[in-house]
Image (tube, grey):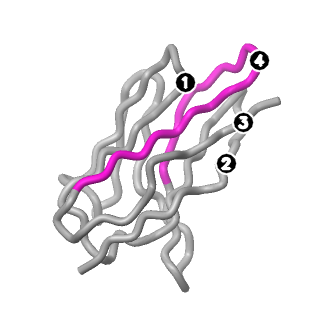
Amino acid sequence: QVQVAESGGGLVQSGGSLRLSCEASGNRISVSAMAWHRQAPGKERELVGYITWGGETNYSDSVKGRFSISRDKIKNTVYLNMNNLKPEDTAVYYCKARIFGTDQWGKGTLVTVSS
């Protein structure tokens, strides 16, 4: 059974940093890309950024220059490094993994940035 699980959320002050992790697990899975999305209260879910297993990355304009995504292919794990956090970054952060060509979502982890 394939599972995608995020970790690392929490409360941080404005200007601070936080690192989220996301692991895809399962028997002999083949991951081709992983992405981070977020959903703020009362808003639609939006793409934060993604990384392919070839190393290509892309970020939304709202986080470009502050967030970065890296991956550990052996562990099927990606990391979202968030710096200079702002109150508007407060959201539930979801990880999505493309496994065997289909998307699997995690349950999300809450990030709260206080002003």
Q: Earlier in the sequence, mark 1 or mark 2?
A: 1
Q: Is residue 44 above or below residue 46?
A: below
Label 1 sits on residue:
76
Residue sitting at 77 percent across and 17 percent down? Answer: 27
What SS does tag 4 mark?
loop
**Residue 40 screen position, x and y as percent:** 48, 75
What is the CA distance from the residue labelled 2 to the residue labelled 3? 8 Å
Mark 4: give few (<14), some (14-19) or many (20+) Cα within 10 Å.
Answer: few
Label 2 sits on residue:
105
| Residue 38 located left or right of residue 107 | left
| Residue 3 located left or right of residue 74 | right
Residue sitting at 45 percent across and 55 percent down? Answer: 9
Q: Is residue 50 magenta?
A: no
Label 4 sits on residue:
27
Q: Quadrant of the C terminus?
A: bottom left
What is the CA distance from the residue labelled 1 to the residue labelled 2? 14 Å
**Residue 86 screen position, x and y as percent:** 25, 71
Mark 3: give few (<14), some (14-19) or many (20+) Cα within 10 Å.
Answer: some
Q: Earlier in the sequence, mark 4 or mark 2?
A: 4
How many numbered marks appear? 4
Give the extent of the magenta segment.
17-36
Q: Quadrant of the N terminus?
A: top right
What is the CA distance from the residue labelled 4 to the residue labelled 3? 10 Å
Mark 2: give few (<14), some (14-19) or many (20+) Cα within 10 Å.
Answer: some
What is the CA distance from the residue labelled 1 to the residue labelled 3? 11 Å
Numbered mark located on residue 3 in the image: 3
